[in-house]
Image (cartoon, grey):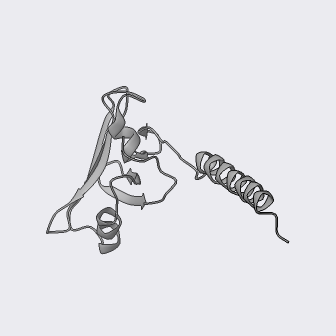
Amino acid sequence: MIDINRCRTAGTAVLTLLSTVLFSSASLAGEKLAYPVTIDLTSRTAYGDLSTARSGSTFDSKSRIGCTVNSENSVTCTAINSGGTTVTCSKYQAAQSMVNAIMNLESDGYVSFQWDAAGTCTYVLTETSSRWAPKR
């Protein structure tokens, strides 16, 4: 014969265990990265994640980073760090691969770009991933 009370107690224990495991792992789940806008004038590189730059309160109120592209495939990338240092590069009729990288950037993504001595964009990297901090 089956003892109903014992089954209820065992069922409650299993549910409690499962909910504890699920909720505790939810708080530990997923890598969350935050990269403030960083500008390296020596290597002519700027990078950062858009969400961290946008949030302002975490690092500062000046940071900004991003790239634009127009219908002529002209690219412009700009970064401003917390100290107010600003860099901009442009490339008229950029390669389609550079345009695609910019067009695929999501609002919670990461962007890195490089430029030459003349201020021409030479490289753009974008990444969209669950590891970037969400919009705040």
Q: Quadrant of residue 121?
A: bottom left
From the viewer's perspective, tell me whether residue 25 is left or right of residue 122.
right
Query: x and y percent of residue 4 in the render?
Result: 76, 63
- Seen as rendered, the residue at the extreme front is 1
Question: Could you say which is closer to the camera, residue 8 or residue 83?
Answer: 8
- Seen as rendered, the residue at the extreme right is 1
Quarter of the image that includes the N terminus: bottom right
From the viewer's perspective, tell me whether residue 70 is left or right of residue 86.
left
Instruction: Count all numbered tags in the image, as a single digit.
Output: 0
Query: x and y percent of residue 9 in the render?
Result: 76, 54
- Seen as rendered, the residue at the extreme left is 71
Q: Quadrant of residue 104?
A: bottom left
Query: x and y percent of residue 70 in the render?
Result: 16, 63
Which residue occupies 74% across, 53% down? 13
Question: Could you say which is closer to the camera, residue 99 or residue 53?
Answer: 53
Quarter of the image that includes the C terminus: top left
Q: Is residue 120 above or below residue 56?
A: below
Query: x and y percent of residue 124 in the render?
Result: 38, 59
Q: Is residue 119 visible?
A: no
Question: Could you say which is closer to the camera, residue 119 or residue 114?
Answer: 114
From the viewer's perspective, tell me whether residue 65 is left or right of residue 42.
left
Question: Could you say which is closer to the camera, residue 25 or residue 78?
Answer: 25
Which residue occupies 49% across, 42% down? 34
Q: Is residue 89 visible?
A: yes
Which residue occupies 47% across, 50% down? 132
Q: Is residue 17 above or below residue 60?
A: below
